[in-house]
Image (cartoon, rainbow, N blue to C red):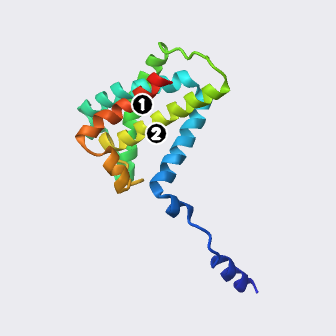
């Protein structure tokens, strides 16, 4: 009896959400929702500071001469995590310094605040993808498909995607 009901359930045409939406869409949507919650919890000022701090942190990380000596872990995933941790060592102090000069104005109602938080969250998602393509490759965790590759890969596009979060902040 149990085996027949199990086989009946397994034969139901339940769509595979990750397969039908595409792994990249699910990954980007989850990242957006996580950043949206983080933006709501931490506030706009700290998120804006993080976006502004990303650029000097990236520059320092790329030009850091001791990067290879500080990668202490072995294995593909652990090396990526080690490099992300080193990047965060640059990002967090710069974010703290920048946040002392960024003032979050609370203009507008909840609707406009929601749109601003959504825009900032989209900016953070763009920065994570740009970070993955240009600074530390996240291919061991999630390899983006050819559509995302065609959007973000290439030296000409890199410049514009680095500007996209700043343009979002300018219009928010």
Towards the viewer: 146 or 27 = 146
Residue furthest toward the right?
1
**Which is more N-terminal, label 2 or label 1?**
2
Q: CA distance from mark 1 to mark 2?
A: 9 Å
| Residue in view at x 42 percent, y 38 percent | 126
Quadrant containing the N terminus in the rendered view: bottom right
Give how far across and how far down residue 150 sits, in percent. 31, 50
- Residue 78 sits above or below residue 98 on the image: below
Q: Residue at x 46, y 39 (%)?
A: 125
Q: In the picture, residue 75 is in which quadrant?
A: bottom left
Q: In the rendered view, does 124 fall on the left or right side of 8?
A: left
Residue 24 spot, x, y in % from top left: 45, 53
User: Residue 81 vs residue 11: left or right?
Assistant: left
Give how far across and how far down residue 159 sits, in percent.
29, 33
The reply to whether discs 1 and 2 touch (Cβ–Cβ < 8 Å) is no
Q: Position of residue 19 (x, y in %)?
A: 50, 63
Q: Secondary structure at mark 1?
A: helix
Q: Is residue 125 left or right of residue 135?
A: right
Q: In the drawing, does residue 40 fall left or right of residue 88?
A: right
Residue 148 visible in the snapshot: yes
Q: Which mark is on residue 165?
A: 1
Q: Neighbour class for label 1 at 10 Å: few (<14), some, many (≥20)?
A: many
Crowd rating for badge 2 (residues with CA inside 10 Å; few <14, some 14–19, many 20+): many
> Which is more toward the observer, 1 or 25?
25
Q: Residue at x 53, y 47 (%)?
A: 29
Residue with the mark numbered 2: 125
Which type of secondary structure does the marked residue at label 2 adopt? Answer: helix
């Amino acid at each position: 009896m149990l085996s027949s009901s199990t086989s009946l359930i397994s034969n139901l045409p339940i769509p595979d959400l990750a397969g039908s939406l595409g792994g990249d869409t699910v990954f980007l949507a989850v990242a957006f929702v996580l950043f949206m919650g983080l933006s709501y919890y931490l506030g706009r000022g700290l998120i804006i500071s993080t976006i502004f701090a990303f650029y000097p942190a990236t520059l320092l990380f790329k030009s850091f001469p001791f990067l290879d000596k500080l990668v202490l872990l072995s294995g593909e995933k652990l090396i990526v995590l080690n490099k992300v941790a080193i990047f965060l060592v640059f990002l967090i102090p710069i974010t703290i310094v920048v946040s002392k000069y960024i003032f979050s104005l609370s203009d507008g109602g909840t609707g406009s605040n929601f749109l601003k938080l959504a825009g900032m969250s989209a900016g953070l998602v763009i920065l994570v993808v740009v970070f993955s393509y240009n600074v530390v490759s996240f291919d061991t965790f999630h390899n983006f498909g050819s559509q995302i590759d065609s959007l973000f890969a290439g030296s000409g596009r890199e410049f514009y995607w680095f500007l996209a979060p700043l343009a979002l902040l300018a219009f928010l």
